[in-house]
Structures are given as C-alpha cells and as structure tokens.
Amino acid sequence: MNKPINQALSECLFFTVKKLDRIMDKIAEEAFKPTGLSPTYGFIILAVNENPGIGQKELADLLHTAPSTIARFVDKLENKNLLRSEHSGRSALTYLTDNGAEMVEQVNKAWDNLHKLYGAILGENESDALSLHIGQIGDQLKR
C-alpha cells in the first residue's frame, strides 16, 4: 500500500460501509428505543406480520441474515411472548402472538422515525436514492 492509512481507509469500500453501518446502528437503536426492541427484532415482527406462518429460512433470506441468527432471534422473541412457532416436519412456521400483533403499530412508528432521522440529515430523495443504490451494489457483489 503506497497511500497513507487515512486515505486508504476512506477509499476502501469495506471500511466505509462498516463506518456507515456503525453510524446507522446508533441512529436505528435510538429510533427503536421506545419499542424496547432492537431494530432487527422490530423488522422480524413486521416481516412475520406481513407473512404469517413464514419459515425461518424464508425470514433469513428476506432479512439477509444467517438462518442460525434468525433462529436465535425468533427464540428470544418467543421468550418475550411476541412470536410463536409451529413445527411442521423439519421446518418451523412463525406467527405473531397477540402481544406481538399489538407491537406492530409501535414498530411501524419506530421505522418511520428511523427514516425521518436520516432523511432529515441526508434529505428524503437522497436517502431513498442512496438506499436503492446500496441495495443494487449489494446484489452485484453477492453474485
């Protein structure tokens, strides 16, 4: 490497994405604080609400998360009485409990607040365009 480390890091996609990830984590945690849930738990609740009986593999694919991580998160949400799983053969189908269904509106508000927080900084059009562009880059790199 023939560049100063600061320059090399600022030109490295890996490090710039990690920096953005840490910053977005803090913003998301703040937005979701009123729910008492982490953002990922909130997104799981929204996904299960929209897809009752979703399998954990499908949930992992939807959220771009390892199946073992989703299984751990679902277990924790079951312990909080927000989700329940029904086992069908080798697969587990995931549903909201009544308590989980009651959380949906609050989680939706937190998600809207998250968008408002970073939209206020970046501008709504810029944040929407950036999200789409980053998603496209992720799809390209995944191939």
Image: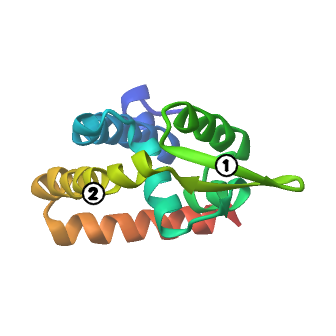
Residue under pointer 2: 105
In the current view of this chain or complex, which residue is farthest to the top? 5
Choose the circle earlier in sequence order: 1 or 2. 1
Measured as percent of width and height from the top left, residue 66 is found at 68, 45
Which of 127/31 is in front?
31
Structural crowding at the residue carrying mark 1, measured as other residues with C-alpha within 10 Å and reported as few (<14), some (14–19) or many (≥20): some
In the current view of this chain or complex, which residue is farthest to the left? 120
Q: Image quarter for residue 17?
A: top left
Q: CA distance from mark 1 to mark 2?
A: 22 Å
Quarter of the image where the C terminus is located: bottom right
Which of 132/84 is in front?
84
Q: Image quarter for residue 142?
A: bottom right
Q: Is residue 25 left or right of residue 56?
A: left
Residue at image position (52%, 42%) is: 14
Where 115 sits versus 70, above or below? below
Q: Secondary structure at mark 1?
A: strand
Do callouts 1 and 2 mark residues in contact (Cβ within 8 Å)?
A: no
- Residue type beneath disc 1: Ser
Residue under pointer 1: 85
Residue 10 seen anywhere in this rendered image of the structure: no
Q: Secondary structure at mark 2?
A: helix
Residue at image position (31%, 51%) is: 107
Structural crowding at the residue carrying mark 2, measured as other residues with C-alpha within 10 Å and reported as few (<14), some (14–19) or many (≥20): few
Which of 80/131 is in front?
80
Q: Is residue 29 left or right of residue 122?
A: right
Quarter of the image where the N terminus is located: top right
Residue 21 seen anywhere in this rendered image of the structure: yes
Measured as percent of width and height from the top left, residue 84 is found at 60, 47
- Residue type beneath disc 2: Glu
Where 69 sits versus 109, above or below? above
Residue at image position (26%, 50%) is: 106
